[in-house]
Amino acid sequence: MSTEPTDVDGDADTSASADAEMPAAARATELASDLGAAVQRLGSYERFTAAKEAVESDEEAQAKIQEFEQLREEFMMARQSGDASNEDLRELQAAQERLNELPVMAEYLDAQEQMETELQELNKMISAPLSVDFGEKAGGCCQD
């Protein structure tokens, strides 16, 4: 007959002792997963994903994205070969402005900025007690 304490189900393990026995890496993974799930429940995350889906399903936005990407690629190639002109740059900037002026894209960019700001704040809260900025390069040697 066992003399180990048991819970009402007859199991020797309790959740508190299971957490204490869990390897640190596994516990950290579980906490990170919980944090990710909590971020997904934020209103700003829901707004961001809805805005992203709206951009992805908007034909006009997709056409302007494709136009911008094509011009950007051409500009980068011209710049590498030394043939890029100020006019090429202005054309690329104009295409970006046309894209960003679309209401669906403006909403996406605003939602993205809000989400990034909240994630930066979260990073500060996580990093503060650790004296390490995990949003930056955590690791490496002798960083100033």
Image (tube, grey):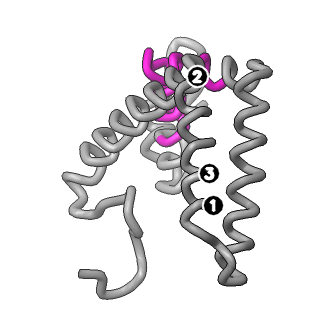
Location of residue 38 with respect to 134 vertically, above or below? above
Disc 1: CA contacts within 10 A as few (<14), some (14-19) or many (>=20): some
Callout 3 amino acid: Glu
Going from N to C along the chain, the mark reached first, 1 or 2, is: 1
Q: Compare residues 15 and 97 and report the one nearer the observer.
A: 97
Taken as a whole, is the magenta stretch helix, strand or loop? helix
Q: Amino acid at mark 2?
A: Leu
In the rendered structure, the answer to whether residue 139 lies left or right of residue 86 reads left
Q: Are marks 3 and 1 in contact (CB under 8 Å)?
A: yes
Q: Can residue 76 be seen here?
A: yes
Image quarter where the N terminus lies is: top right
**Magenta extent:** 32-52
Give the CA distance from mark 3 to mark 2.
Answer: 17 Å
Q: Residue at x 74, y 72 (%)?
A: 77
Question: Where does label 3 land, which residue?
Answer: 91
Q: Which mark is residue 88?
A: 1
Residue holding disc 2:
102
Q: Position of residue 30 (x, y in %)?
A: 53, 40
Front position among marks 3 and 2: 3
Residue drawn at x 59%, y 14% as measured from the top left = 9
**Residue 3: in sight, yes or no?**
no
